[in-house]
Image (cartoon, rainbow, N blue to C red):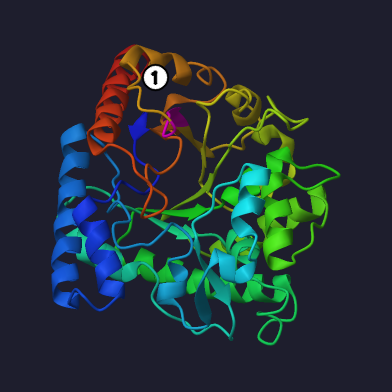
Amino acid sequence: MAFTTTVVGSFPRSRELIDATKRHAKGEVKQAELDRLLEGATKSIIAQEEEAGVEVITDGEQRRSSFVSFVGDKIPGFKVMHITQLNADAMEILKRNKVQLTYMRAVIAEELEDSVIAADEFKAARKYSKRPFKVTLPAPYLVMWESWHSKLSKAAYPTPEDFAYAYAKLLRKEVLRLKEAGVSFIQIDEPMLGDLTEAGDKPDRYRRVFNELYGQEYRGFKQELKLAVDLLNEVTKGVDGVRLGVHMDRWPNKDSPYFDLGYERFLPELLETKADQFVLEYTSPGTGDPAKLVKEFPEKMEIGLGVVSVQDYEVESPGTIVSRVKRVIGSIEPERIWLNPDCGFAPGMFRTFPTDVAFAKLKSMTKAAEMLRKEYA
């Protein structure tokens, strides 16, 4: 189908759920009560996605503390710590570099043990909809940068790469579990690769932050790109029968010498990734021209085109969204164009975003897809 609509992953949590999660951590709320709220939140999010007309849905990541650090809650070997435990000046470091991170960090401290990461979430959500489901997983290159600490992790994994490849092998097992369970679309979230668009001889702001917080060293632009692609391919190696996507964030920084250049900076190496779709952000100024990238795509490679912003509360009109999609029409067939928001609406549990605005944006997106199908399909 042309112009299939989907979402990137997360949706805002209710204040009731956030408060109950905090109190559960203190032992003030029983697990049964938290489970009841999680079930209700999942059911509600899915119902609203269906009402908005979204064709490939998620559970809204309601059971996750954040899109990445939740692995510390699921996989033995991680130690969940507050960011100030890694560096007493952490908040100042974030402010100085204009970077936002969730405050609870999952740091690798012992050898990993194979564990279910998201298949249980899919099982809990599947009963609420018959529509195709997307499930998201944090990528190994991302988790390496976010979790390997030069002092706390060395005993288990002497180098960041040792840890990253071990996690990639574990993640592949979860991909196969999700495929077997009937998931339609498995999305590997790789914002650290997207942030590499700002890097060159010097690291981007996120790697500067992780250098100060974790003691990791920047390898150089081409070396980082190759490592990220190799790790993705370790996850997807030999996997077929399910759509595999890679989501890359893009938070343009006007101070970067690469502002206004996009993911085309990763060519040709990016196209060595064994995936079916790249899910990309393109609504912010400075993200570049998507046509420059997609015209280099191999046959059958799809784009998940970011067409609504998750950074502001203005609901884009269907016409505005149509104009954003038309930037790539002529460079790639309509059947290979998917529409989605730039990113998740609430990648961390405590990020506030009005739920009514999020779903109004989705309704506008699905209306734009209808308009595009009438014109092009």
Q: Quadrant of the N terminus?
A: top left
Judge from the rendering whether residue 110 lies leftward or rightward of residue 283; answer left or right: right
Is residue 12 visible to the viewer in this orientation of the structure? yes
Where does label 1 land, which residue?
321
> What residue type is disc 1 on?
Ile
Residue 344 image point, x, y percent: 40, 44
Residue 355 as seen in the image, left or right of residue 223: left
The number of discs equals 1
Mark 1 falls on what kind of element? Answer: helix
Of 49 and 129, nearer the camera is 49
Question: Does residue 230 sit above or below 50 in this rendering?
Answer: below
Residue at 18%, 41% in the rendered image: 48
Return the x and y of residue 237 as percentages of the image width and height.
Answer: 58, 65
> At 21% from the left edge and 47% from the top edge, which residue is drawn?
45
As displayed, is residue 131 above or below residue 217? above
**Front in this rendered view, residue 146 or 29:** 29
Residue interval drawn in magenta: 306-311
Specify few, some or many for label 1: CA neighbours under 10 Å numbering under 14, 14-19, or 20 or more. many
Residue 270 seen by the camera: no
Residue 263 in the figure: left or right of residue 199: left
Q: Residue furthest right?
A: 201
- Position in image of residue 116 (x %, y %): 38, 76
